[in-house]
């Protein structure tokens, strides 16, 4: 049934393309695959990678990141910073406009003047008030913005995020239609970079209110100011982007159209090789087939951690004592890494994210005798777990042989039945993300751009908390970093976080691996900084 449904979906997608494509002879278009469906394109709350890709291309903040990673003008054409680095004043482009579709006008009109509806004289200018409203939404705890914490340096933002103050008290002020002042509580060297994040995108209050809670959930509830607009959205299948004819930024889109497909079968790598897809994010394992081939362009990023991950939501490993017993009986020497692995590691924190401090965490000591004794003690203390319990370890096919050797060690020491579930990497990672595992030896990709964001993955409320780890002290430690503090103090917190995750048996690190962004044959200019941050404006094809 599943296969039939997938084939039907694929057929519908093909029909959608060829029945609706109105490509002219001199027009260019790009094709891009994603592996999850689009949920919400509201930039203040978009959290999945697929939705983020659309939002980064259809919205534009005060500043943006170009292909070289430099911060360049966007919604603001110039800005100034006070001598104490606490006040930023932005002069906005006066020719920037919202793209309001006829579909949105019809959908959001209302004959009853008492109801919230889009006004007939809707102002399509992108003004300072739009940025103020967007920033207030991002820090309002009722919004639930995944990226609102990026703005915590703005005056009162931290208290607003914690519910202690109102969003109207945020240190963002429209001095006039085209002048925005942002005041900080403390100096933040990366503040301009944080303004490139989706949380800092403008939002028209009149349009938002007219959507009545549906903002970003369909194309008629989107108001774009970026290089592209959403032209068509087929849920579960594809989003079609068109070059924004009203965009006046310095770098307009070089291509006319981008098709972003949600693929349900096959890998991104296969789609790029077989066509017509032009680029995509792939694993190091998949990237091997593109190396040393001039037709493809590869860009790597060391942001993948392999390790043994314990599912704390499972009955077996809900207690730290059992996790610690298993962790103390892991012999990493039996793991034979394939060629694409970068190197062994005992770090939870990826080295590429920690250039400013050296730290050697204390691992749980490998001791088979102590592991066996602690396992029995943990069983005695947990009546719900039988001494004949069986455990299944989820892993990918390329590591199956190595993991089997580890299973034999657990079986010998604990006297229990330990089974392996070996799947393709794509299937294994989907099961992992769904929490369908007890122990997993798998890679976790990190799209975080700084150390604090990496450790926030393991907080109780994080959407990326793959293990289900929940510890009040850990959460409080991470949340304390929203206050102004020295780098030395932050470093001590990072060390404590890393040691805590290891000591509590949440993960046993093993290897680091790079992820790759691939440009297909004859494709140029598409650039990416993470799986959820891909830019199409410079993309071209031969």
Image (cartoon, rainbow, N blue to C red):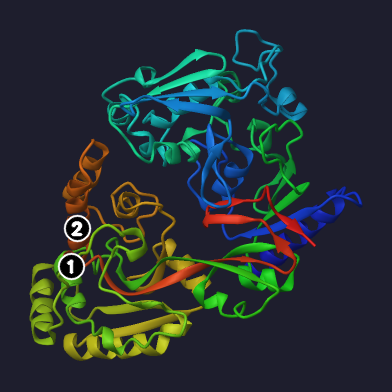
* Residue at x 57% of width, y 31% of height: 214
Q: Which residue is drawn at 45% across and 81% down?
A: 422
Residue 495 numbered mark, or none: 2
Of labels 2 and 1, earlier in sequence is: 1
Given residues 117 and 88, the one toward you in this image is 88
In the picture shown, does residue 213 fall above or below 270? above
Q: Nearer the viewer, residue 486 or 37?
A: 486
Q: Marks 2 and 1: CB-CB under 8 Å? A: yes
Residue annotated with mark 1: 361
x then y, percent, for residue 388: 21, 81
Q: How far apart are marks 2 and 1 (CA)?
A: 8 Å
Q: In this view, does 232 lie above or below 426?
A: above
In this view, the residue farthest toward the top is 113
Mark 2 secondary-structure assignment: helix
Quadrant of the snapshot with the N terminus: bottom right
Residue at the limit of the structure toward the front, as seen here: 83
């Amino acid at each position: 049934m599943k296969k039939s449904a997938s084939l039907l979906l694929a057929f519908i997608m093909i029909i959608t393309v060829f029945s609706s494509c109105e490509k002219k002879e001199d027009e260019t278009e790009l094709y891009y695959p994603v592996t999850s469906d689009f949920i919400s394109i509201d930039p203040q709350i978009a959290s999945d990678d697929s939705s983020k890709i659309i939002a980064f291309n259809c919205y534009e903040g005060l500043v943006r990141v170009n292909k070289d990673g430099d911060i360049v003008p966007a919604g603001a054409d110039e800005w100034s910073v006070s001598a104490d680095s606490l006040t930023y004043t932005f002069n906005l482009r006066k020719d920037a406009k919202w793209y309001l579709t006829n579909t949105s006008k019809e959908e959001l009109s209302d004959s009853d003047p008492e109801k919230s509806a889009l006004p007939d004289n809707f102002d399509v200018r992108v003004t300072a008030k739009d940025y103020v409203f967007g920033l207030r939404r991002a820090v309002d705890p009722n919004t639930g913005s995944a990226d609102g914490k990026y703005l915590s340096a703005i005056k009162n933002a931290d208290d607003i995020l914690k519910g202690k103050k109102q969003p109207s008290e945020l240190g963002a002020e429209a001095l006039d239609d085209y002048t925005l002042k942002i005041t900080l509580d403390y100096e933040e060297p990366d503040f301009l970079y944080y303004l490139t994040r989706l949380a800092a995108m403008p939002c028209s209050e009149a349009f938002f209110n007219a959507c009545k809670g549906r903002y970003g959930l369909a194309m008629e509830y989107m108001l774009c100011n970026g290089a592209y607009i959403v032209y068509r959205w087929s849920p579960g299948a594809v989003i079609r982007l068109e070059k924004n004819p009203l965009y006046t930024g310095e770098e307009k889109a070089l291509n006319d159209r981008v098709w972003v497909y949600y693929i349900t079968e096959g890998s991104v790598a296969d789609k790029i090789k077989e066509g017509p897809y032009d680029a995509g994010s792939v694993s190091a394992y998949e990237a091997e087939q593109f190396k040393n081939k001039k037709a493809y362009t590869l860009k790597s990023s060391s942001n993948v951690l392999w390790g043994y991950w314990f599912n704390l939501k499972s009955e077996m490993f809900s207690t730290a004592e059992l996790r610690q017993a298993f962790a103390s009986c892991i012999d990493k020497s039996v793991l034979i890494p394939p060629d694409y692995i970068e190197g062994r590691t005992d770090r939870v924190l990826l080295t590429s994210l920690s250039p400013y401090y050296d730290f050697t965490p204390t691992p749980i000591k490998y001791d088979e005798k102590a592991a066996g004794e602690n396992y029995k003690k943990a069983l005695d203390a947990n009546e719900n777990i039988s001494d004949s319990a069986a455990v299944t370890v989820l892993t990918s096919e390329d590591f199956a042989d190595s993991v089997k050797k580890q299973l034999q060690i657990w079986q010998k020491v604990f006297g229990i039945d330990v089974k392996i579930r070996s799947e393709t990497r794509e299937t294994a990672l989907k099961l992992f993300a769904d929490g369908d595992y007890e122990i997993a030896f798998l890679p976790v990709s990190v799209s975080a751009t700084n150390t604090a964001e990496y450790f926030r993955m393991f907080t109780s409320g994080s959407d990326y908390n793959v293990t289900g780890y929940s510890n009040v002290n850990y959460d409080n430690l991470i949340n304390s970093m929203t206050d102004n503090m020295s780098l030395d103090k932050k470093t001590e917190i990072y060390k404590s976080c890393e040691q805590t995750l290891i000591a509590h048996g949440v993960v046993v690190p093993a290897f680091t691996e790079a992820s790759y962004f691939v440009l297909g044959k004859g494709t140029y200019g598409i650039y990416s900084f993470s799986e959820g941050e891909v830019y199409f404006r410079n993309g071209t094809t031969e």
